[in-house]
Amino acid sequence: MQYINYRESWQRGTVDFPFEYHHITPTHPQYIMALHWHVEFEIVRVLKGTFQLSIDELEYTVEQGSAIFIPAGSVHSGLPRDCTYECVVFDMNMLMNKNDSCCKLIRKIIDHEVEPAFVYPESHNDIHQTVWSLFDAIASKKDGYQLVVLGALYQVIGTIFAKQYYNPAPAQPPRNHKRIIQLKTALEFMESSYNKQITLEEMAGSVDMSPKYFCRFFHEMTHRTPIDYLNYYRIERACYQLMTTDQSITEVAYSSGFNDLSYFIKTFKKYKGTTPKQYLK
């Protein structure tokens, strides 16, 4: 999974079938789901272990066998624990066709008029069976799998409405709406500037806050300090470059925003538990 940008913005799947599938195990280079958001919807199934989900300031411990529904635009992250999980990221507009009765319901979700539940434990057998069919089909890529995926997705959404697994959207934006917008702005600034020498004052200035208030705000939202998260993001970028380019460790260090190789190695080991050289092996 390449959650490299805080706001992912690339083509999902293909133009005629915009579904992107990932199977994630502890050996995957992007095993931890970094804090990010995207304009598409996402469904996650937890095959093994537990998955600590954070979504728009809410925290969930998701157990094996559960499914997760992540609305478009939600800021989310995941900390897997001895976990194997899979993700499908997709454009909900793919489901919009000339069937007006279907379109009206799907539009309620796209427009955030209703808010489907985020987590569906295995005890929700109706959702469980359909989500498992969806993932098994997209993983197999057998002839006709696209039809199975689309049919399963329609069934999931239909079940959400039939069983009322949702809440009506509040008439007014929730109190944390402004905070989430500010967080997105700060994350976008860090993502666009991580390879430069940026200061705490510059990060705080991106959302018109004082450094002191920004530190408190950012820690409340992410449970990390801004500098800690910036370094974490730089190391995530460095891992991706090490795995996908022919750049040397020194080149990767400098292109990831570090101006001292020894500090890069020390920081890399802090977040990955190993040195860059050992990581490549």
Image (cartoon, rainbow, N blue to C red):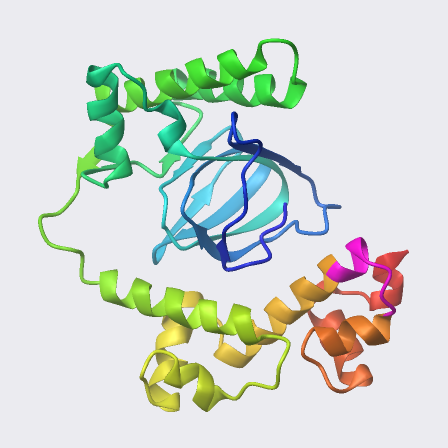
**Which residue appears farthest toward the top when viewing the image?**
143
Q: Residue at x 46, y 15 (%)?
A: 129
Q: Quadrant of residue 144?
A: top right
Q: Nearer the viewer, residue 123 or 202?
A: 202
Q: Is residue 27 visible to the viewer in this orientation of the structure?
A: yes
Left or right: residue 114 versus residue 235 is left
Pick out the residue farthest to the left. 171
User: In terms of depth relative to the viewer, which is nearer, 15 or 148?
Assistant: 15
| Residue located 66% across and 12% down the image | 142
Question: Is residue 38 found inside the magenta-colored segment of the image?
Answer: no
Q: At which x and y percent is residue 278?
A: 88, 62
The answer to which image quadrant residue 217 occupies is bottom left
The percent coordinates of residue 170 (x first, y second) are 13, 47
Q: Residue at x 34, y 78 (%)?
A: 207
Q: Quadrant of the N terminus?
A: top right
Q: Position of residue 269 (x, y in %)?
A: 76, 71
Does 73 sit above or below residue 193? above
Considering the image in quadrants, where does the C terminus appear? bottom right
Q: Does residue 163 appear in the picture of this structure?
A: no
Say which of 253 and 35 sits in front. 253
- Quarter holding residue 195: bottom right
Magenta span:
241-248
User: Height in image: 144 above or below 36?
Assistant: above
